[in-house]
Amino acid sequence: FCGVSCTKRRGRIDSMLKLLVIGNTNVGKTQFINRFVSNKFQEEYKPTICCDFAIKILDIDGNEIRLQMWDLQGQDRVITGINKLFCKGASGALVLADITDISSIENTANWKTKVNEYVVQYQSEFQQ
């Protein structure tokens, strides 16, 4: 399975996958990425401005996978405006919610629907 790009190098396939991390404001998207990529946790809250991304190199069955984790600015309204552009080339998405905030849980279905819409739209354009 290859996402954004694939290259063959010395008998193994190197892949780059783009993973969107989305959800309402203040659900812990940045902290999730920081913990996964560098095993760090920051106590203070710093909201993401627009977007950010981090790369984690994974070795899966001898294949090097470069996982780009895109941290999209949380909004209590579902993905709008510029965030649509960040869906282009995405291999998948994680929708995060705060279990202490019912509205963030209720919005997960909306986030999933919208990201599916945009990812499918861009994948169709790319394949043509």
Image (tube, rainbow, N blue to C red):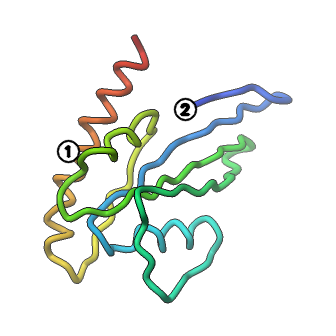
Residue 120 in the image: above or below residue 49: above
Instruction: Name the N-terminal-most of marks 1 and 2.
Output: 2
Farthest residue toward the right?
A: 10
Q: Quadrant of the C terminus?
A: top left
Q: Secondary structure at mark 2?
A: loop
Which residue shows up at 17% across the image and 59% down it? 77
Residue 6: x and y in percent read 65, 28
In the rendered structure, are the residues bearing label 1 and label 2 in contact, judged by CB atoms less than 8 Å apart? Answer: no
Residue 70, x across and y down, in percent? 48, 53
Q: Residue at x 42, y 19 (%)?
A: 126
Quadrant in which the N terminus is drawn: top right
Check residue 4 in the rendering and tell me which mark sits there, or answer none.
2
Q: Secondary structure at mark 1?
A: helix
Circle 2: residue type: Val
Q: Name the image quarter holding residue 98.
A: bottom left
Q: Which residue: 44% across, 39% down?
A: 90
Mark 1 residue type: Thr
Could you tell me residue 53's position as x and y percent? Answer: 54, 55
Q: Residues within 10 Å of mark 1 (few under 14, many from 20)?
A: few
Q: Along the horizontal axis of the image, is 14 left or right of 73?
A: right
Residue at image x 70%, y 35%? 14
Residue topped by disc 1:
113
